[in-house]
Image: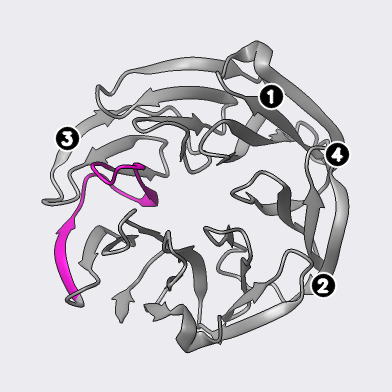
Amino acid sequence: MKIGRSYSVAFSPQADHLVVCGHDVRMYDLQHSARVWCAEPFRHPSSAVFSPSGEVVVIKNTAGAIACIDPSTGSVLRRVPGDAEGAAPAFFSPHELLDGSWKGALRLVDVKTGAARSLDSFTGQMIQGVHTARRGTVCVTRHSTIATSPIEPPQPDHFCLWSAPFHASSRVLIPQPRRFIRASAMSPDGRYLALVQGTKAVALTVLRLPDLHSVAELTIDAGGTGSGLTWSSAGALLASVQNNAARFYSPELTLAAEVHAPFASAVAFSRDDTLVAIGAWQEGVVHRSSAIGL
């Protein structure tokens, strides 16, 4: 099933609908292979995620604003202002999510009320990734230091590990900084952290949490339309967006399948892992996992 231009893709918990962010936001009925609605809650939508119950779709744009959308109609239920671009938010409870900005702010947002409260703030840092696991009881955040010199490179990226209930004192710094990280993703069981990193030579790496011990690493053919990483719902597969392709690996980085996907930008798995959506700058596609060898 084709889904058009799609920078970000996300399945509903029931795997019967798919939300897509392109220039606009679109909802597809997967059972009838039909578009349900098209909406423009604001300019430049960049990420989408369903709440665990499927009652709300959360869209974030490049200005850091959040729109909570009715998945049935596409109407905006409530808005949460933002102050800067940042990482895609991640749910940690049925109606609360963690949201990070490139100004170093990390906040908790209640999608039922639109209320937002500060969790922590990191001066001189950008929150580049927010990942939850183990039903929202564990979180990893990726931090990069804002460059202050035109000559010297910035400090390496680092990670913080958080445990529920989330508050500033529940944060633990992981003492293994890494340079030039392009993307990151934590496995659903919280055992692994996958990274894409490098400049000229780009590597896909799987690390064990919490010590970041290396499990496997390989050089990949990175493309110009993103380096998205996504774990399957069961954690048995890691999807990597590469140059005009989506490749699927075991946690030990054994190649399981690959799909030719011009200008690929994102991958999502349904909750039961029977469907895979590959977003692309030109034309995204939804596949049955069995049809692509998974």
Query: Helix, strand or loop at disc 1?
Result: loop
Measured Cα–Cα span from mark 3 to mark 4: 41 Å
What residue range appears in magenta? 34-56
Q: Choose mark 4 or mark 2, whichever is in front.
A: 4
Q: Which mark is residue 124?
A: 1
Amino acid found under the numbered disc labelled 4: Asp
x, y percent for residue 90 = 47, 39
Residue identified by numbered label 3: 77
Which residue corresponds to the image point at 46% horizontal and 63% vertical from the top-left?
Answer: 268
Say what amino acid the circle numbered 1 marks. Answer: Gly
According to the image, label 2 marks what residue?
A: 219
Q: Nearer the viewer, mark 3 or mark 1?
A: 3
Asked whether the residues under the numbered discs 3 and 4 touch, taking CB atoms below 8 Å apart as contact, a structural biologist would say: no
Identify the secondary structure beneath mark 4.
loop
Instruction: Tell me which residue sits at (38%, 67%) in the image.
Output: 6
- State which tag comes first along the sequence, 3 or 4: 3
Relative height, residue 159 to residue 287 (above, below)? above
Q: Quadrant of the C terminus?
A: bottom right
Work out whether 110 lies above or below 243: above
Along the viewing direction, whichever of 290 and 149 lies nearer the viewer: 290
Q: Which of 134 and 249 is in front in this view?
A: 134
Residue located beneath label 4 in the image: 211
Q: Which of marks 2 and 1 is nearer the N terminus?
A: 1
Q: Residue 257, position in %: x, y?
A: 62, 83
Q: Earlier in the sequence, mark 4 or mark 2?
A: 4
Per the model, the C-alpha gap separating discs 4 and 2 is 22 Å
The reply to whether the C-beta atoms of the residues labelled 3 and 1 are less than 8 Å apart is no
